[in-house]
Amino acid sequence: MPASIVVGTQWGDEGKGKATDYLADRMDFVVRYQGGNNAGHTILAEGHTLKLQLIPSGILYPHITSVIADGVVVDPRVLLEEVDGLAALGIAIDPSRLVVSGNCHMIMPYHLELEKVTERFLGKNALGTTKRGIGPAYADKAARIGLRIQDLFDEKILRQKLDVVLKEKNQVLTRVYGRLPITAGLIVDDYVRYAERLRPHVVDTSKLIHEGLRAGKNVLLEGAQGTMLDLDKGTYPFVTSSNPVAGYALASVGIGPREVDRVVGITKAYVTRVGAGPLPTEDTGSEGERLGARGREFGTVTGRKRRCGWFDAVIARYAARVNGLTELFVTKLDVLSGFETLKVCTAYRAGDEMFEEFPPNQSLFHDAEPVYEELEGWDEDLGRVRSFGDLPSPARKYLDRLQDLAGVSIGVVSVGPAREQSLTAKGGIAQ
Ligand code: IMP
């Protein structure tokens, strides 16, 4: 059975959890392939709200095995806290249902400390990261001085690697930033305790998924963040330090391109962004405020207010291209009720030039002025609509225009957080 990929087409927070939930019934495995506890989704269970940052959203379904693949950076403390949080809600996690690759790099205490001081050092040029140590952990991975989950299971190796790394990190912390040095002993004590609890969850995830596919199981590969935050394909340097794009799912999990036949692009009906960096269609006036208030646009991880703006078809087309999208899952259409007209950005103007495609040079993108088309709005509350055909005509025209501009057809439209608020469009999402 071929695998499916779910990927954000904007700057994250598109509602990927909702899409995963929609597809979960048919899945046997849900796999996180990049990022770390910078992502977040809220789940409702037993009348309680739980915020999960690392554990894939499939965890609430007893028939699903949740997998954390090699490309994710794992803060073991956070992962175990999430397991404990679920247990406190009466959802005890059998180790065979939550598995982690031993190749995952770990977020260490010095990554958190270094990110704090470097963001402060950057001053007004700071990226506005989530301060979870993501960038420093991926930097160490690329520099080949990272510690991986498998290193936890040999205390001698763990100590040796830590000693080497801390020699350099402590020079930077003390001499460059005037901070106190970090001692290996305390880290080892904590991480050896984590090792004991993590051990039953650590398996060869690549082999597991490969065998699952061979046995006809359904596999969903779930990206965090979004295309425009991709380290290579996003708005560098205002990006995260990993690759949310669909192609990276293969490298992270360790399967070939022929194993995937469906790439679902999650697209909010408008756009949002947290942190610094260009957002051409941002509306800093009352309409942006209204989008933020109606859409409850606050970050799951940091609680920061998200910047809001109009749908940007230039990046939608770009996301369709770089991810090879086979269909769109449009979220939060209900938020757009009550606007007399809706703007959709069809191209950018930068200097004397017009761009219908994402500009090839970052300076052009920074200067991009959106070229808008205005579409008729609607007043009806869409939250009660249960079938695509019952959407008001202007809402259907809005969606038609979105898919024409993006060049990918819409499979599902969501009009609220509940499962029954997902409307299947003509053709739907291939089953
Ligand atoms: P980092 O991933 O913490 O290094 O942050 C880098 C940039 O990505 C910042 O602008 C963050 O706000 C943004 N970012 C990281 N994770 C998410 C996410 O899950 N949703 C939205 N933005 C994110």
Image: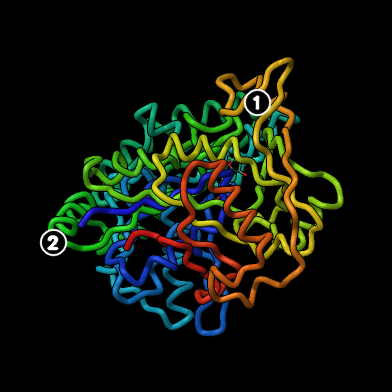
Q: Position of residue 1 (x, y in %)?
A: 20, 57
Looking at the image, what colour scheme do you see?
Answer: rainbow
Q: Nearer the viewer, residue 413 or 104?
A: 413
How far apart are the alpha carbons under marks 1 and 2?
46 Å
The image shows residue 40, relative to residue 59, as above or below, that is above
Q: Amino acid at mark 1?
A: Phe
* Ligand 1 positioned in quadrant: top right
Query: Decide: marks 1, 2 in contact (CB < 8 A)?
Result: no
The image shows residue 152, relative to residue 247, as above or below, that is below
**352 to the left or right of 240:** right
Marker disc for residue 365: 1
Q: Residues within 10 Å of mark 2 (few under 14, many from 20)?
A: few
Asked whether residue 142 is in view, the answer is yes
**Residue under the image location 66 percent in, 71 percent down:** 382
In the picture of the structure, the residue carrying the numbered disc 2 is 215
**369 to the left or right of 364:** right
Q: Quadrant of residue 393?
A: bottom right
SS type, badge 1: helix
Asked whether residue 36 is in view, the answer is no
**Residue under the image location 46 percent in, 40 percent down:** 320
**Residue under the image location 51 percent in, 76 percent down:** 420
Q: Position of residue 27 (x, y in %)?
A: 30, 66
Q: Nearer the viewer, residue 273 or 418?
A: 418
**219 to the left or right of 32:** left
**Residue under the image location 59 percent in, 48 percent down:** 402
Q: Amino acid at mark 2?
A: Ala
SS type, badge 2: loop
